[in-house]
Image (cartoon, helix red, strand yellow):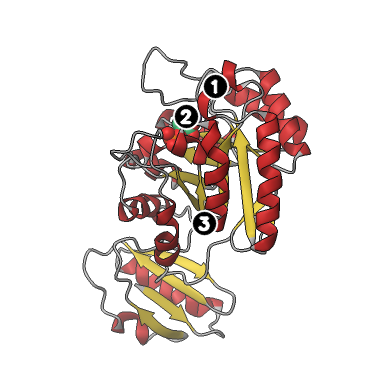
């Protein structure tokens, strides 16, 4: 349920509502808005009696949230969520490009890629220190050493770091190294991991599971938000279908319903979505046109020698060409590329 306060409600009146929620053994989520504060309530398994709150001073109205995902739903939060970081803003009017190699392979290639990206106006580098690989014999990432490389490159260049967290064991190490914590497709329903990142105060990039419905995906976001971490960025990366012409089927058609059901920003990963670098630019441009709030693109200084996901990684020249095209389309759509 959502308790909407009067626009002139006092801090004391807001606190009274919060205390009443706690007395009922439920969780209050204060949601400050442009004109008024609302308090989301979670933790109830049955409907809450609205009269418990409607009679309190400063309360304007109580609204029932009908969707199973509460905090992620637009019923609870009408305006789009805006996530502001020093390196860029996720939200309306913006289009954020996050790019980088699939894995942290060594310090020189991360440094080189970070400098290249900054020179081209990209201020988030994504690279994995921990890699979820189908084969146990494939390169698994440099682990903690990879995180240290990312931290040093961030210090030297100022680029924002996005990197994947796979195990609960490394929550604080990844949270320290990252500006945005990636939860991979295979972990979208790792509920204990989601609960762990719900306690962290860093934005979470939540990839869609390989066979997840939109509702399941938003329920995963709800796990993160229910613990008090409201900064969730969704990432469509393709789902498994019978189609075998591409690595996955990039479901751009999920963007409009996602925007209608949820206020969370959604970005698109056309690299894992297609699996082939030749197909990446078309789907990246389509994602921008379809209303996405940004992209996650794999780019590598020497893709044919990459230790993971080389076939879907753009080289620097290909990436620059795509950035130029994105700039032009973004202008038409009144979005600023950052
Ligand atoms: C990745 O981003 O490199 C990755 C492993 O992605 P996903 O979890 O979407 O497969
Ligand atoms: Mn990859």
Residue wearing tag 2 = 170
The residue depicted at 31 percent of the width and 56 percent of the height is 215
Local SS, label 2: helix
Residue 290 in the image: state x and y as whole percent.
Answer: 51, 58
Viewer-proximal residue among 286 and 337: 286
- The relative height of residue 131 versus residue 250 in the rendered view (above or below) is above
Q: Is residue 114 left or right of residue 243?
A: right
* 1 and 2 marks in contact (CB < 8 Å): yes
Between the residue at mark 1 and the residue at mark 2, the CA separation in whole angstroms equals: 9 Å
Front in this rendered view, residue 229 or 215: 215
On the image, the x and y values in percent for residue 34 come to 59, 75
SS label for mark 1: helix
Residue positioned most to the left? 46
- Real-space Cα separation, disc 3 to disc 2, in angstroms: 26 Å
Contact flag, marks 3 and 2 (Cβ < 8 Å): no
User: Residue 22: which numbered mark, if any?
Assistant: none
Residue 165 visible? The answer is: no
Does residue 115 appear to the left or right of 11 in the view shown? right
In which quarter of the view is residue 90 placed? Answer: bottom right
Tell me which numbered mark, 3 or 2, is placed earlier along the sequence.
2
Pick the residue in front: 166 or 270. Answer: 270
Q: Which residue is mark 1?
A: 144
Alpha carbon separation for disc pair 3 and 1: 29 Å
Q: Which residue does the numbered mark 3 point to in the structure image? A: 265
Residue at point 31%, 46% (across, down): 212
**Secondary structure of residue under mark 3:** loop
Q: Residue at x 75, y 38 (%)?
A: 118
Residue occupying image coordinates x 47% and y 85%: 58
Quadrant containing the N terminus in the rendered view: bottom left
Q: Is residue 76 left or right of residue 11?
A: left
At label 1, counting other C-alpha atoms closer than 10 Å, the crowd grade (few under 14, some 14-19, many 20 or more) is some
């Amino acid at each position: 349920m959502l308790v909407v306060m009067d626009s002139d409600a006092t801090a004391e009146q807001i606190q009274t509502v919060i205390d009443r929620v706690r007395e009922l053994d439920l969780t209050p989520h204060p949601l400050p808005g442009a004109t008024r504060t609302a308090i989301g309530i979670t933790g109830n398994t049955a409907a809450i009696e609205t009269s418990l709150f409607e009679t309190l001073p400063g309360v304007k109205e109580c609204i029932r949230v009908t969707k199973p995902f509460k905090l992620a739903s637009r019923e609870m939060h009408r305006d789009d969520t805006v996530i502001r970081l020093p390196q860029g803003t996720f939200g309306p009017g913006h289009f954020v490009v996050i790019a980088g190699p699939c894995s942290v392979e060594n310090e020189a290639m991360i440094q080189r890629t970070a400098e290249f990206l900054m020179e081209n106006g990209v201020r988030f580098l994504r690279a994995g220190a921990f890699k979820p690989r189908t084969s146990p014999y494939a390169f698994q990432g440099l682990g903690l050493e990879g995180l240290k490389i990312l931290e040093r490159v961030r210090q030297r260049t100022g680029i924002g770091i996005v990197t994947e967290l796979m195990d609960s064991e490394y929550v604080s190490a990844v949270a320290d190294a990252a500006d945005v914590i990636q939860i991979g497709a295979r972990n979208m329903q790792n509920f204990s991991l989601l609960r762990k990142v719900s306690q962290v105060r860093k934005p979470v990039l939540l990839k869609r599971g390989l066979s997840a419905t939109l509702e399941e995906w938003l329920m995963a976001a709800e796990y993160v938000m229910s613990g008090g971490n409201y900064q969730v960025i969704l990432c469509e990366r393709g789902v498994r279908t019978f189609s075998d012409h591409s690595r996955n089927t990039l479901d751009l058609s999920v963007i409009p319903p996602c925007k209608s059901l949820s206020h969370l920003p959604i970005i698109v990963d056309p690299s894992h979505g297609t699996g082939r670098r030749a197909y990446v630019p078309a789907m990246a441009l389509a994602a921008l046109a379809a209303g996405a709030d940004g992209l996650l693109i794999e780019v590598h200084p020497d893709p044919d020698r990459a230790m993971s996901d080389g076939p879907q990684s753009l080289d620097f020249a290909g990436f620059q060409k795509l950035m130029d095209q994105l700039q032009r389309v973004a202008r038409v759509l009144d979005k600023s590329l950052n």
